[in-house]
Image (spheres, rainbow, N blue to C red):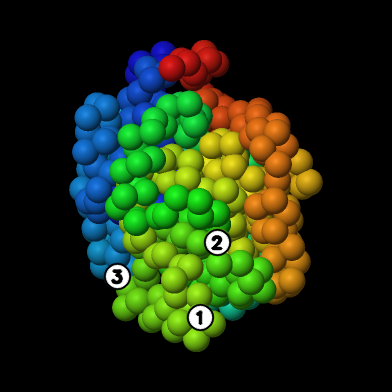
Amino acid sequence: MSDASTAVLQVLPRLESGGVERGTVEIALGLKAAGWRSFVAAEPGRLVPELEAAGVRYVELPLASKNPMVIWQNAKRLEEIVRAERIDVVHARSRAPAWSALRAARRAQVPFVTTFHSIYSGYEQAVKQRYNAVMTKGDRVIAISDYVAGHVQSHYAVAPERVRVIPRAVDLELFDPAMVDDDRRAALRARWDLAPGQSIVMLPGRVTRRKGHLELLRALKRLGRDDVICVMVGPAEAGESYKKQVDLFARTARLDRQVLMTGQCDDMPAALSLADVVAVPSIETPEAFGRVSIEAQAMGKPVVVHSIGGLPETIMPAATGWLVEPGDTEQLAEALTLALAMPAEVRARTAVRARSFVAERFALERMVASTLDVYREVVPGAPSAPVLQR
């Protein structure tokens, strides 16, 4: 069997923005670069044109649905695709579509791979655990961090020999400070009306409670500095109830002139290039990994992250950033103060160290190569040719 005849079908709910979606696209493009045949099934979204432009076959199916009848219908359609396109591996990246994908893969007798992208809620409850457990049915189960791998093995009793840890990655060509010119930065500064001389603390991420926006504002209040602006980059959750809470807290704490909520940003490298420090103060539900942390470091920015879930795996404490205990507002404020006070020469050395750290552990090529190695494990006769470099 040659790589040219080897085909992988990735299955996920939809192709909008997010870590699951971005990881799917990265692997799909990596498969094409390595000469494999690449298929993605999902509901439509903003990432579909990128896939199709690269020659990846996109299949539209209502895979976000949890309706048992729709799941059964999706399984039939996926099985037809697997047989017609001679798919060699079915890779499920989320629970609802995984139920369809598992049935299709088993009926067509092809290997089934899953990726745990998060610690799914309700795993303590028997009914929810049975629903979540579809992600453990893979011939190989990919975990996006050591933290997730430990959870999978301890809560779902998955044998260690079936688990592979493959961290999320960053595209070092896209997230490269040398590639972000003054015009891109100026365009964002103008769009966001950022005044010269302001120190920027940035929190990228969807505006939801678990991302810790209120934690960051409490720390900002403790700083007591009117030259610091907190830029929160990301869309709000449906209904925007939490966004309203953040707005209310900012006004009550008299921080409203120091808080900017930008909404969706389609040029995150340029956004991160504006930051003096990037904060990831996640709370409550542990982050499975922390893509924002590695993207910021790839851009040479110091990071301050909460010591929760997989976040500690994304930094070199005291070298590329600070680890802070969740809920410790004073410690968070102190870390931000230290980051903002870094002399220029120290900041420059930290930037080089941070980018080197990310390049060594979280390069996109490494994630793609490791994932293709997993596919080769379950496809008898698939060659061990290296992934083509860009």
The answer, for residue 265, to whether it is visible in the render is yes
Q: Residue at x 31, y 50 (%)?
A: 190
Taking 346 as reference, is 37 above or below it? above
Mark carried by residue 43: none
> Residue 349 or 96: which is nearer the viewer?
349
Taking 325 as reference, is 149 above or below it? above
Which residue matches tag 3? 67
Q: Residue at x 21, y 38 (%)?
A: 49
> Residue 297 or 141: which is nearer the viewer?
297
Q: Where is residue 137 in the image (x, y as percent from the top left)?
A: 53, 52
Which residue matches tag 1? 254
At mark 1, the secondary structure is loop
User: Is mark 2 in CB contact (under 8 Å) with mark 3?
Assistant: no
**How dense is the environment of label 3, judged by Cα within 10 Å: few (below 14), some, or many (20 and up)?**
few
Q: Report the mark closest to the observer, 1 or 3.
A: 1
Mark carried by residue 227: 2
The answer, for residue 144, to whether it is visible in the render is no
Q: Quadrant of the C terminus?
A: top left
Q: Residue at x 35, y 23 (%)?
A: 32
User: Residues under labels 2 and 1: Cα distance?
Assistant: 14 Å
Residue 368 relative to residue 359: left or right:
left
Q: In which quarter of the image is the N terminus?
A: top left
Q: Which amino acid does label 3 sit on?
A: Asn
